[in-house]
Structures are given as C-alpha cells and as structure tokens.
C-alpha cells in the first residue's frame, strides 16, 4: 500500500469517526424490496413462544432463571412450570455452544404440558447497554438467537440508540419495513439450528423470527434492564424503540449507584425513597409506552405487584407464582 493510500484511508476513518451517529447508521436502500408489516397475525394455533399466548390473554407471566448450563440442565428444566426461562450470561459463562446444548436438552425432553416444544428462553448477555458497546458486540445478540432462543434482555440499557441497535441486529434484512429502524443485519445460516429448535422450516423461521408485538407474526421478545442513572435519564425514549416488549428497573444495580456498597447503610433497599422513585419512573414509562413491566415477586407481595401493573414476575416454580396465577384466574395449565 502506498503512503498516499494509507494517508487517504486514515483521513476517511477520521471523517467517519467525526460524523454524527445517525449518519453512520445503515439505512434501507430505496430499491430494497421490503414487505409491509402485517396488521394482524396470519398464524393460527399456539405460538412458538408461550409468553405471547399468555399476554394475548392479558395474563402475567412468571420466569425461572439459570446461570449457564448445557444439555442435562435443559432436560431438567424442560418440565418447569415457569412461562419462560432466563438464561443468564451477563455474569455467567458466555458459552454459546452450551446454550445450544441447553436448548437441545429442553427440546428432547419436551414437549411441555402446554403443548409447546420448549419453554421460551430469554437470554441476558455481557454487553454494556451503550451505543458503542452494541455496535461492537451485536454479534452476541445474533449468536444467541442462532441457538434458537426466544428473546434477549439488554442489561444496563442506557440509551434508545443501544436498544435500536439490538433490534436491528435481531432482524433479517428482508423483514417488514419499520419507521425508526434501519434494515436488519442477521445473516444467512442463522436460521438452521434455530428453526429445528422451534419445529418450523427454515423459511418459516426467517418469517416469524421478528420482534413481537411490533410484528404480529413475530415470536421474539426483547426487553431492557433500566438499572443505572444514565439509563433512567433516557428511559422514556428507550422503552419506545420499535420492537421493545418489556422493561425492568434493576434494583440490585440501582442500589449500587444510589445506596452504596451493601452493608454500609441501614434502612435502605427497595423501600428507600430514591429507589422507590426509580421504580415508579420505569413503571410509568412502560405503561405510557404500552409495554410490559418486570419486577421481582414473592409470596407476600405478588398480588400487590400484579395490582400495580407488573406483567412479568420472578419465581416461575414457586408458591408466589401459584398465588399470582390463582389471583388472575389463569385457566391454562400453570
């Protein structure tokens, strides 16, 4: 490479770096053949993702959680009463091969008692929820989805730009056009294993592997953990990004920022005024945006949480979930 070429390449990189973020974003070419979004679902019967079935009946859902794990762990959790499983890789091992094996274990020990091939699985990833981090690490979103999971929960989701990049990374380039989103970036080959986990053809997978309820035919769910003051300042915008279906307020991390190191204060926790104010702000933002709110629940507070508008609770296999299901008169199994 000549000196002149090197200099020109360097100048181009500098110019690109100095450009506004919006100018660097991919946009759908004018000649791209993108279908219009369906106004209502074209499918019948059960969804691949059981959470959607429950929400369409206005029923709250309850999840179990696992930190990593492979085939044997999948076999054990196949019989969970939980509506979905959080597969935790934010602080657990980042191992996509194990995630695939976990999904295979769920599948081979299924179907569930509700007739779904597997419980829904939503993954947390060790991506800081900032624009730069998402731009550099969107591959993690795509690797997780290629394992056949049913959604992603973005941790420390600090900005609407980060949320948007997650959604764009999850969509195929030919997915229906959506105002506010650039063309998707998922690549060919990602449909193979995932479609087998879902029990559909590869072509059908590529049609329905899209965010719900943005796409009425979609089967993927995307959420945001609003869990630090920077995320709080943007929450009203972040939860309105097309494709976001739910959000939570992250009391554990918020406590680090607002209260300090655990054990160094008394009378704090979730009842502290500054913590309660954050929870209320995130809850109000989800209600205004028409998305669902996630909050920890226990047997003592689950009914109050549901009355407050919580639509996703912890403890899918606990008495708290049984109490909540009875309160909302759920008629489906569990």
Image: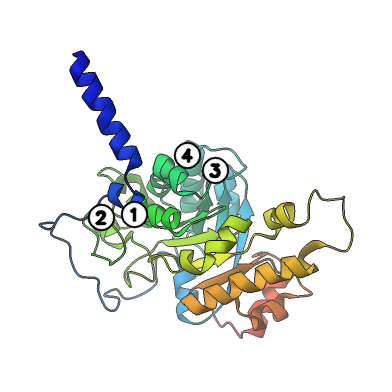
Q: Secondary structure at mark 4?
A: helix
Tell me if label 4 and label 2 are in contact, CB under 8 Å.
no
Q: Which residue is mark 2?
A: 183
Q: Which residue is mark 1?
A: 168
Query: Mark 1 to mark 4: distance in Å?
Result: 20 Å
Q: First in sequence, mark 3 or 4: give its number.
A: 4
Q: First in sequence, mark 1 or 4: give its number.
A: 4
Query: Mark 3 to mark 4: distance in Å?
Result: 13 Å
Query: Mark 3 to mark 2: distance in Å?
Result: 24 Å
Q: Which residue is mark 4?
A: 96
For the residue pair 47 and 287, the one nearer the viewer reads as 287
The residue depicted at 66 percent of the width and 67 percent of the height is 278
For the residue pair 23 and 241, the one nearer the viewer reads as 23
Image quadrant in which the N terminus is located: top left
Q: First in sequence, mark 4 or 2: give its number.
A: 4
Q: How is the image coloured?
A: rainbow
Could you tell me residue 122's position as x and y percent? 51, 56
Q: Is residue 263 above or below residue 296?
A: above
Q: Which residue is mark 3?
A: 126
């Amino acid at each position: 490479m000549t000196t002149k070429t090197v200099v020109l390449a360097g100048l181009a990189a500098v110019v690109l770096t100095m450009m506004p973020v919006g100018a660097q974003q991919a946009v759908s070419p004018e000649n791209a053949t993108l279908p219009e979004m369906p106004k209502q679902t074209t499918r019948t019967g059960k969804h691949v993702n059981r959470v959607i079935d429950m929400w369409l009946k206005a029923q709250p859902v309850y999840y179990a959680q696992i930190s990593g794990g492979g085939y044997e762990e999948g076999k054990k959790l196949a019989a969970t009463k939980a509506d979905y499983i959080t597969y935790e890789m934010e602080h657990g091992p980042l191992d996509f091969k194990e995630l695939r094996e976990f999904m295979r274990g769920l599948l081979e020990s299924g179907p569930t008692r509700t007739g779904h091939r597997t419980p829904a699985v939503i993954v947390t990833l060790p991506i800081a929820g900032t624009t730069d981090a998402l731009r550099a690490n969107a591959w993690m979103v795509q690797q997780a989805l290629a394992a056949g999971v049913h959604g992603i929960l973005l941790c420390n989701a600090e900005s609407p730009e980060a949320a948007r990049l997650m959604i764009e990374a999850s969509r195929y380039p030919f997915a229906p056009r959506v105002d506010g989103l650039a063309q998707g970036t998922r690549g060919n080959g990602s449909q193979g294993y995932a479609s087998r986990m879902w029990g559909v053809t590869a072509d059908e997978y590529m049609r329905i592997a899209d965010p719900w309820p943005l796409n009425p035919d979609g089967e993927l769910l995307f959420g945001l953990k609003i869990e630090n003051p920077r995320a709080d300042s943007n929450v009203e915008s972040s939860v309105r990004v097309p494709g976001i279906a739910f959000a939570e307020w992250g009391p554990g991390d918020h406590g680090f920022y607002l209260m300090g190191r655990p054990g160094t204060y008394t009378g704090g926790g979730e009842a502290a005024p500054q913590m309660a104010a954050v929870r209320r702000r995130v809850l109000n933002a989800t209600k205004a945006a028409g998305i669902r709110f996630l909050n920890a629940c226990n047997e003592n507070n689950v009914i109050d949480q549901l009355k407050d508008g919580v639509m996703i609770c912890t403890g899918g296999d606990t008495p708290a979930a049984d109490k909540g299901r009875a309160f909302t008169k759920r008629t489906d199994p569990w």
